[in-house]
């Protein structure tokens, strides 16, 4: 699998992780937003079925500190917004590993 590239965004609290292929599953909306770990696991009242990459990213913490504020997925991009309590150098590598570890759960 090709590498995942990381791009800065206009918001210093967010980074875009560009995947080598689409990460939207067949039948899903073209853009998905997850505002919490529960939402990412499919437990929201909005009725979404969750997403394995978003759920994995919400597992990223720095000690007991929650690190992830929001995950936005569109086509082959995953944009992650971190909380104010952590720095990118503490979590970027973890996020890359979570994406790599869960991308195979998405059908081609």
Image (cartoon, grey):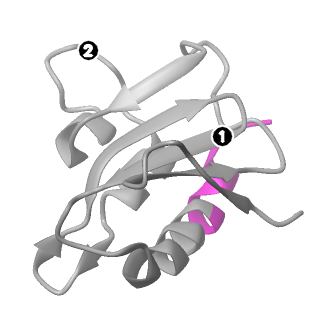
Q: Main secondary structure of the magenta part?
A: helix
Picture disc at residue 47: 2
Residue beneath the point at 33% across and 70% down: 60
Left or right: 88 in relation to 62 = right
Q: Residue at x 42, y 55 (%)?
A: 12
Residue 36, position in %: x, y? 21, 42
Instruction: Quarter of the image for the C terminus: give it.
Output: top right
Q: What residue does disc 1 label?
A: 77
* 23 or 96: nearer the viewer: 96
What residue span does the magenta drawing correspond to?
A: 100-108
Q: Residues within 10 Å of mark 1 (few under 14, many from 20)?
A: many
Q: Is mark 2 on a helix, strand or loop?
A: loop
Residue 26 position, x and y percent, is 67, 19
In the picture, measured across the screen, residue 44 lies left or right of residue 53, that is: left
3D distance between C-alphas at marks 1 and 2? 22 Å
Q: To which quarter of the image does residue 78 belong?
A: top right
Considering the numbered disc 1 on the image, is that residue within a helix, a strand or a loop?
Answer: strand
Q: Residue 106 appears at what percent x and percent y?
A: 65, 42
| Residue 103 magenta-highlighted | yes
């Amino acid at each position: 699998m090709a590498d995942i590239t990381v791009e800065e965004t206009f918001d210093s609290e967010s980074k875009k992780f560009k995947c080598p292929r689409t990460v939207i599953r067949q039948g899903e909306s073209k853009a998905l937003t997850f505002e919490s770990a529960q939402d990412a696991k499919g437990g929201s009242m909005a009725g979404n079925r969750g997403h394995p990459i978003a759920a994995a990213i919400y597992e990223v913490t720095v000690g007991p500190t929650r690190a992830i504020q929001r995950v936005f997925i569109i086509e082959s991009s995953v944009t992650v917004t971190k909380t104010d309590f952590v720095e990118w150098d503490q979590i970027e590598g973890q996020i890359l590993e979570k994406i790599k570890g869960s991308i195979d759960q998405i059908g081609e």
